[in-house]
Image: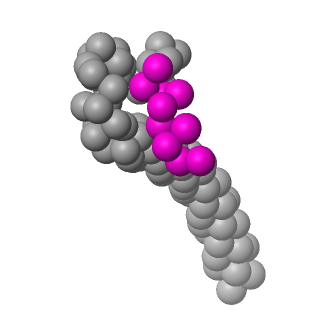
């Protein structure tokens, strides 16, 4: 089953922008080779495609996590400033009472 998936990847290089242009071109070049050579390269090419896709997914997840972290920090900074203002107001009220 894995070999069939790899064959499809080689026969139909990915032009959707998911893969780097160099990998698409490599896939096209592999399809021009003899079937025996294609068979030797098919598995390696498939692993590289899988690796690239996995790295892109990981990068996307990291970018999303960083965006969420930035948002969380903004909320925390807002809460901190509000807490400081409240503290300062309460101190002022205490000083006025004394």
Q: Is residue 63 visible?
A: no
Residue projecting furthest to the bottom = 98
Chief secondary structure of the magenta portion: helix
Q: How far from the left and from the top, in percent, is residue 75?
A: 64, 54
- 85 relative to 51 in the view: left or right: right
Q: Nearer the viewer, residue 78 or 46?
A: 46
- Relative to 37, is 24 above or below? above
Q: Quadrant of residue 38?
A: top left
- Relative to 62, is 98 above or below? below
Q: Within the magenta stretch, is there residue 9?
A: yes
- 6 relative to 44 in the view: left or right: right
Rendered-image quadrant of the C terminus: bottom right
- 52 relative to 83 in the view: left or right: left
> How are the residues colored?
one colour
Residue in view at x 34 percent, y 36 percent: 39
Residue in view at x 59 percent, y 47 percent: 1
Q: Nearer the viewer, residue 14 or 63?
A: 14
Q: Nearer the viewer, residue 12 or 4?
A: 4
Q: How far from the left and from the top, in percent, is residue 12?
A: 50, 18
* Number of marks: 0
Q: How far from the left and from the top, in percent, is residue 21?
A: 32, 17
Residue in view at x 35 percent, y 18 percent: 31
Q: How far from the left and from the top, in percent, is residue 88?
A: 62, 68
Q: Is residue 11 visible?
A: yes
**Region rendered in magenta:** 1-11
């Amino acid at each position: 089953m894995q070999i069939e998936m790899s064959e499809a990847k080689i026969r139909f290089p990915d032009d959707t922008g998911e893969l780097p242009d160099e990998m698409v071109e490599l896939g096209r070049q592999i399809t021009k080779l003899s079937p025996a050579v294609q068979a030797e390269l098919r598995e390696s090419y498939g692993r590289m495609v899988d690796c690239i896709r996995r790295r892109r997914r990981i990068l996307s997840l990291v970018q999303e996590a960083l965006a969420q972290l930035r948002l969380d920090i903004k909320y925390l900074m807002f809460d901190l400033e509000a807490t400081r203002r409240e503290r300062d107001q309460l101190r002022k009220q205490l000083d006025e009472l004394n």
